[in-house]
Structures are given as structure tokens and as C-alpha cells.
Image: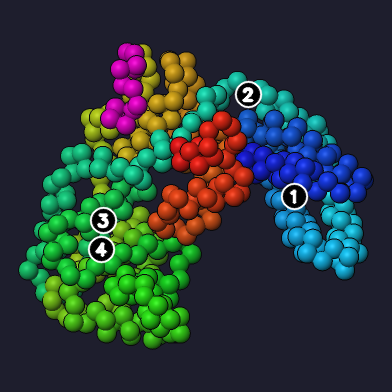
Amino acid sequence: MAEALVSFAVQKLGDLLIQQVSLRKNLREEVTWLRNELLLMQSFLKDAEQKRSGDERVEQWVLEINSIAYDVITILKTYSIEAGKCASCLKVCACICRKKSYNVAKEIQSLKQRITDISVKREIYDITNTINYNAGKGTSNKVRTLRRTTSYVDDQDYIFVGLQDVVQTLVYELLKAEPRRSVLSIYGMGGLGKTTLARKLYINPNIASSFPTRAWICVSQEYNTMDLLSTIIKSIQGRTKVTLDLLESMPEGDLEIYLRDLLTERKYLVVVDDVRQKEVWENLQRAFPDSKNGSRVIITTPKKDVAERADDRGFVYELRFLTQEERWDLFRRKLLDVRAMTFTMERVAKNMVGKCRGLPLAIVVLSGLLSHKKGLDEWQKVKDHLWKINVEDEYIEISSILSLSYNDLSTALKQCFLYFGIFPEDQVIEAENIIRLWMAEGFIPRGEERMEDVAEG
């Protein structure tokens, strides 16, 4: 992440030097010095970020560089805003602009001291040698698309290899002749496909036709009960101006009552996805009336106690791990070119897949990563890196595979990928909008192709 942030800071400093021709000489020199120092640091960061989980010195060093890059971007944004204001009233604001330039110069002086301190630490703690020692051990080829890294979001039917009977069982539980409003809980480790299974049930034709009113909410780790209630109401009534204005003016207690009244005469199915604390359902359940008409609630959670406490008489299903045969079948189906896999490469891959604990997410990301590695040596490097990270573990952690996949991206793709973090969890993002935003931020490299085409790719 620091590498991408530093790259962005370097780019913005370069833009300032080009666009602000009238910068005072001493300020231009300071900006140039700062840009050159960050460029030097950037050359170390890729290997440093891969090493950081194993060395506290490197970890702290990377964090400090990250902090400086963030402050650089903040200072430049402030300067740009003030410069823009001055441009509209040149004579009146000239003195203000000079003052602002002075403040920016002082800020940069502070950053220079911090960079000097970091450079000293790099020498004192021998961080350069620590990083260089590992420079040849990581991965080198750049992933040219985010699609393989995140393909589990688009195509998740893979988790139902051998699980068709589970879908049928859960459909039966939702449709059985039980008038009481009941809760169906799905729990299991992250990466097993709880949300995907719930989505499969939600869009099932028999379910859709049996529940005239349906709604889906995702509970983020820092959830807000009012937002959850509002989301359900908007799902049912639509996002009309009348509804939005009404919700805007309602306190939490009224939202609960309003939703309860809205659902009282309806047969409904509501999915509450990714519940991590038992208090979430305790705070929501009063809004879901039991009109003895067969209404249902589906809860997905990584925690067994949350699943079991949601409803004393509800149905609880623990999502299982993939079998050895299912794991290998999934890996092969998500690999871009199975025919290029030699017998020795297959043996290395089976070793890694076996360590993925039967988690679909881990296997899919691993397959995507290896799809862009050519030959046995490249596959062996990935294996060695994962084994080094998980030296004391029986299984590979998902975070290790995700981190390795992220580190393997080019700097431009890292910036584009990290940009998704500004959106709320589980939000649907229009591709056309994200393309415009990436272009506006300057993330898309210029070349012979149209920027829109590059961004779309």
C-alpha cells in the first residue's frame, strides 16, 4: 500500500512543478528535493512491503514512509485549493497566496527533516540489506488485470461443487409449512462462501415467487442500526424522493416502528449478511413482526454462537470445507491455461492447494495468481514465499495469499484497486463511474490507447 501511496505523492509533486510555473525558486527547489527523495524510497518499497510482515524494523520504516506520503498529498491538496481561490481574484489575494506558499514551504521543511530521520534509521538498522537480501525471492511478473485477483466476486458458482444437495435442503427449510417467522443461520470461516450461498437462495425462482417482499442488507464491521433499518425500507419501498425525505427526518425508534408496520401484512424474506456480533440481530429483530404467514430471515455469520442464538427453534447450517477432489477441480477450472501445467508444476500446485484448508476463496485467488506465473520456477517462488510467511502454520492463511496477490500488482493497478476502499462495504459500483473517477485522480497511465479503453481493461 505504501508503494502505491508514494507513487501517487511523487506524481502529484511532479504535477505541481509542471502546473505551478510561478512557484518561488526556493519552494520549487524544496518540492524537487522532496520528489527525488520519495522516488529513491519508492525503489525500496516493493520488496520492503513483502518483507514487512516478518521484520518489525522494516514494518515501522514502511509505516513512516506511508505517513509522509499521506502528508505530502494532504499539503498539496490544501495548496491547490488555496491557489484556485487566488486565481479568481489575483490582486486581492496575492498576499494570501504568498502567505500560503510560505506555509507550504514550512510544511515541506518539516517533511524534509522526517525523511532525513528515516534515511538515518535505514542505515542504523541495516534495513537496506535486509530488504535487498529478499529482493530476488519475491514474485516479479506484474498482474495485468484485477479480474483474476477479484474474480471470486463475479463467479461464485464454484462453491456449489458437491453442494447442490445443501441448496435444496435450505430451500426446503425456507419453504416448509411453518407459519412462525423463523431464522435460518449460515455460519463458517471467512472464504467458505456464506454470502454466495445466501445469494443463491435469495435468487432461487421458488424462493422469489414465494416471498413477495424481499430485502438484503450487509452489516459492516462498524454498523449503524438506523442505516440498516433505512436500507431495508428503501429496498421494499424503492428510493423515491418521498421515501428518502421521510427516512431523513425519522429518529431510530420511529424507523423501527415504521418498518414493523410495513412488514406486518406481508410475507417477507430478509437476508442479514455478515453478522459478527449477537447485538446486531438483537437490535434488529423487533422490527421483524411474526404475522404467522411463513416469513423468514437468513443470517450469515462467521461465528457459531451468533448463528445458534439468533433463533432457539431456527435452522442452523455450518458451511463445510471443500473435499480434496473438489479443491483440485476448483483450482483447475479457475486456472487460465491448464494445458501449460507440467507434471512437476502440478505437484507444486497440489501441495499449495492442499494447504488452502479447503477454502474456495483461497484456492481461487491462488489459481488467479499462478495463472500469471510462467513455468515451474515462478510457481516454486510463489510456494516458497507462502511457506516462508506461514512457516509455523499447518495451513496457508487467506491473508497471506491475498497480500501476495496484491503485492504482485503493478503500481498503477494497486492505486486503482485501493481506490475501491472509499466506497461503503457491499455497495454496487457502476463501472462507468469508477472509470471516470480513476481518470480524474490521474491513476490511468497515458499511452497510445484512449484512457477510457485502458481504464475499462
Which element type, helix, strand or loop, lies under badge 3?
Answer: helix
- Pinpoint residue 428: horizontal percent, then vertical percent: 40, 56
Q: Could you tell me if residue 306 is visible in this image?
A: no
Q: Residue at x 16, y 51 (%)?
A: 167
Mark 2: secondary structure? loop
Height in image: 407 above or below 222?
A: above
Residue 151 in sight in this render? yes
The answer for how far apart the CA atoms under marks 3 and 2 are is 43 Å
Give the spatial CA distance, label 2 vs label 1: 27 Å
Q: Residues in magenta?
A: 331-343
Give the mark nearest the N terminus, 1 or 4. Answer: 1
Q: Residues within 10 Å of mark 1 (few under 14, many from 20)?
A: many
- Disc sitting over residue 135 in the figure: 2
Q: Residue type at mark 3: give it.
A: Ala
The residue at which mark 4 appears reads as 298
Q: Nearer the viewer, mark 2 or mark 1?
A: 1
Is 313 left, or right, of 429 in this rendering? left
Spatial CA distance of label 1 from label 4 is 46 Å
As rendered, which of 358 and 364 lies closer to the eye?
A: 364
Q: Report crowding for label 2: few under 14, some 14 to 19, many 20 or more residues within 10 A (C-alpha).
A: some
Q: Residue under circle 1?
A: 72
Q: Residue at x 35, y 42 (%)?
A: 152
Above or below, comparing residue 241 to residue 204 in the picture: below
Q: Which label's residue is closer to the chain start, 4 or 3? A: 3
Quadrant housing residue 281: bottom left
Residue 198 — which label?
Answer: 3
